[in-house]
Structures are given as C-alpha cells and as structure tokens.
Amino acid sequence: MTRRGFRAGPAVRVLGLVAVLAAVIADGPWAVAAAVGGFVAGFGLTIGSLVRLWRRRHPPIRPLDFGHSIDLLRRAHGAMAGWAVGLREGEVQVPADGGPGGGRGGPGREALRRGAALVQLASADGRTHVAREMGGTYVAVGDFPYGAGLLLAERDAAPAIAEAAADDLRRLVASMRLAELDVPQSESVLVAKQLRLIAGGAQTLDGIARAGADLAQQLSQRGAVVAIQDPGTHVVRVQAVSSAADKRLLGIALAPEAPATRAVAQGIPVVTQGAEDILGPGVPDRRRQDRAGTAYPLTDGFTNVGALVLMGPGTEPDSPAAERIGRLVLELGPRLAAARAVHEAEQRAVRDPLTGLCNLREFERVMQKFGADDSNRTQGACLVYADLDRFKHLNDTLGHAAGDAALRHVAAVLQAQLRDGDVVARIGGEEFAIWLPRTPLKEGLEIAERVRRSVEGKVWHWNGTAYRITTSCGVAACPDHVRDLGNLRSAADAALYRAKQGGRNRVELAGAAD
C-alpha cells in the first residue's frame, strides 16, 4: 500500500462517521443507509488485512495422527506391531491386522503386552532397547515422556536392521515432542520437564533419585530424601539426599518401624511432629526441627518403589507447593521403578545372587582392567583365595538353607575387612577371592590374616545355636611370586591348597614353584 493510500483509509472512515451523524440528525433514512454504507466501505478496506493478520498469528492447529504414522513405520519395516506412548491423546498400539489382540497373522496378546511394557521402559530411561525373542525382535526408543517401538518379524534381526528401525523411531519420538510443544502445559507436564532437566540425562538409579530430591527441595524449600525399597528383602534404604539434608543419611537402611518405612509398606503418606523422627531410630542425630517430616510413598501402579521424605513441618494441603509435590510424587515413582529394574538387571550380570558379592566373571574383568593399564605395571598387587573349612560337612548336617546362610555370613565378614578399592568375589561354591590392587606382599599377608581371624571370631548362629566357622587362605603377589598377572590366580590357588593340607584355618604364601 502506498503512503497516500495509507492516509486515505483513516480519512474515509472519519468522513463516513461524520455522514452517519449528520444523517441521524437530519432524520433521513436514505441518507442514513448511504452513510452507513460508506462507513462500512471505509472499514472494509482493512477487514481483509485484519483477518489475514489474525490467521498468521493463530494458525489452525491440525493434530497429527500418530496412529497412522506408527502404522506407516510398521509397514515400512515389515513389523508385526508398533507402539507410541506419552501422547496427550493416549497410547497408540497398532498390531499387524489392526485388531486389539493380533489375531490371525499378527502378534498375540502376550507379545503386545511385552512390547508395550518395553516401550514404557524406554520412555522412562531414555535408552534404546533391543530384545530378540521367540516371537520376533523388539526395538524401542524413548525421550521422556515419549516412547515408540516396533516388533520386527525376524526372530534374530541383524544389528543393521534393528538400528535402522531405531533411527526411524527416534525421528518419530522427536516429532511427537515437537508436535506438543505449543500445547498449553499442565502442572504435571511442567514438573516432569523440571525433573528431566535437573536429571540432566541421568539414567541411573542414583541419578534419578538425586534429581527427585533436588527438585523436591526446590518446590518445598525443605531438605528432601529419596529412599528406595529393595524388592527382594523389602529393606528401605536412603538412595539420595538434597543439598539441605544431612549427608550422613546417604546409604543408611531404615528400621522396619520407621514412619518412612511405614509409608512405603502401607502406600499412604505419613506425617510426624515433635520428637518423632520421620526416618525412625538408628539414624544420625540431627537438629530437632529436622526430625519431623512427611513421607510420601512412591509407587508404580500397584508396586511400592520407595518414599520421598520432606524434612520439617508439612506443607499446607491446598497450597501450590503441595500440588507440585503431589505431581512430583506421581512422576518420580514410575521413573524410579524403571531405573531400579535396569539397575537390578545390570547387577545380576556382575553379582553373585546369593551373597551379593562380585561373581567370577566380574572379578576377572576387574583384574584384566588393572593389567591392561600400563601405569599399573610398576604397582604391586596381591590376590587372596579363601575357602571355608569343612563346609560340606556343615551343608550335609544342617541342610542347604543353613549352608547358604553361612555363605552370606562369611561374605559380610569379608566385605567388612576390605579397604576402598579392594574387591571381594565369590568364585566357587564356598570359595572366595580378594583382589588387593597396588598392595605390597607384606600388607596383603596382613589383610589375609585379619580376614582369617575375623571369620573365626565372628560367631555364626543357626536356629538359636552358635557355630564356629574357619577359613583357609592362600596369598600370592605380583611381581613377588609371579611376573605375569595372568598366573596370579594359579599361584594363589596352590597356596590355598597347602593351607588346607597344613591343617586348615591358616594362611599360606605362594612359593617360587607356584
């Protein structure tokens, strides 16, 4: 529009308004009609531009059909089913035949349930999961709270095929996030994004628990603790503390009668006041105002995961802070459950299931890693083999349950005698190995003797009866006994054999012949 035209529009509108007023005063109906027409015509010069401007600022939103998108992706990869989770309109599940249960030529209900669970896990931990099973190969990716997955038809799909599917799924997840960026965010979504931002990409149980404690402190202006329940023993242990909470609480196991433990067991919030400690007896002594608190149970569906504990007086029930804390509790439970499942799977690969010590495979990996580091070649190292004396007789007399309990008892005794950096493992039935990196022979011998005395002095009880357990130890050092680290195990084993032959309950050193 020219500058002259720009000025003409307002002039026409003013003249039109004057004409309308004059016509009303003159009481001429035709004059009124003509004036109104001129006035409307003057405004009509800008109505179109106003409409166009409004449309540019408020474009019509056409929701993306992610059900169609995941189905197209499924067809492109010849997959039997596809999933998308985290969308506001709900979860998407597309079997090959379009039916809810797979039906003829499609996956069964159990396969669909397994795939949906894997996609949910990926949406929580942000990892790429590839599971090759009898029914096909599951591929799932996620970026909290979004996730997508496919069930490839091949039972053992090649890595390149699985990675190609994962790449397409990542792009789909990214588009899911972008499509919902402009949607007004609810309180729960804001809390979820804050949690993810504080976690900073952390996918471990420790990282997510610490992020939850830090965010709880920000929202409530109180010190916060996240405690996790062990699914096997049901022991509740402090996993993370915020910056305003007592650092001595980290790692402690809460007593069964502790209010926080009660909140986990019963699945309801517990509030304490006065002198009653929210974390129960046996915890480090703290200021009186830090003992009271509120324990919120963290759950994943019907599974109790742990508790979020806020120190100090409780928040007002209807306050914005209380609402945000409630949203955090709902958000934190499933994320911790997924992280705990991943943590347990990783631990099963490296831990002995009975004693919780390292297994033989992990122990060998630790030793190999030490030997592969050139900077350790000039450092000494000791290896101690320890074997329980007459364990077969104990097992046959008292039963296998007693034998397992005895092994757990000895494992705890050995673990208590070690220093930072030392590693103890169960490498056989009743045989243990203790790795002492950067340790000279004399010090390694002292540690082995201390271990022997501790096992002998720590009485073990079974069914109310005290039993004495002893152990024989063999010690080998590098480079004192062997030049090659790979021969250290055989030298320690030979020394252990001599300890057994020499009368048991003793420590023997490896010799030059070993």
Image (cartoon, rainbow, N blue to C red):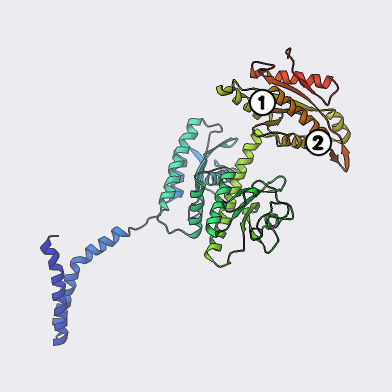
Distance CA(mark 2)–CA(mark 1): 29 Å
Foreground pick, 379 / 279: 379
* Count of marks overlaid on the render: 2
Foreground pick, 299 / 133: 299
Q: Tell me if residue 493 comes above or below residue 268 in the rendering.
A: above
Q: Is residue 108 visible?
A: no
Determine whether the residue tagged by mark 1 lies in a helix, strand or loop.
Answer: loop
Tell me the tag on residue 439: 1
Q: Quadrant of the rendered structure where residue 60 is? A: bottom left
Q: Tell me if residue 278 comes above or below residue 494 in the rendering.
A: below
**x then y, percent, for residue 339:** 59, 44
Seen in the image, is 399 located left or right of residue 316?
Answer: right
Seen in the image, is 327 located left or right of residue 492?
Answer: left
Q: Quadrant of the rendered structure where residue 296 is? A: bottom right
Q: Tell me if residue 65 comes above or below residue 376 in the rendering.
A: below
Q: Label 1 is placed on what type of residue?
A: Thr
> Residue at point 88% right, 43% down?
464
At label 2, counting other C-alpha atoms closer than 10 Å, the crowd grade (few under 14, some 14-19, many 20 or more) is many
**x then y, percent, for residue 207:** 56, 45
**x then y, percent, for residue 55:** 29, 60
- The nearer-to-camera label among 2 and 1 is 1
Tell me the tag on residue 406: 2
Of the numbered discs 2 and 1, the one sitting upstream in the chain is 2
| Labelled pair 2, 1 in contact (Cβ < 8 Å) | no
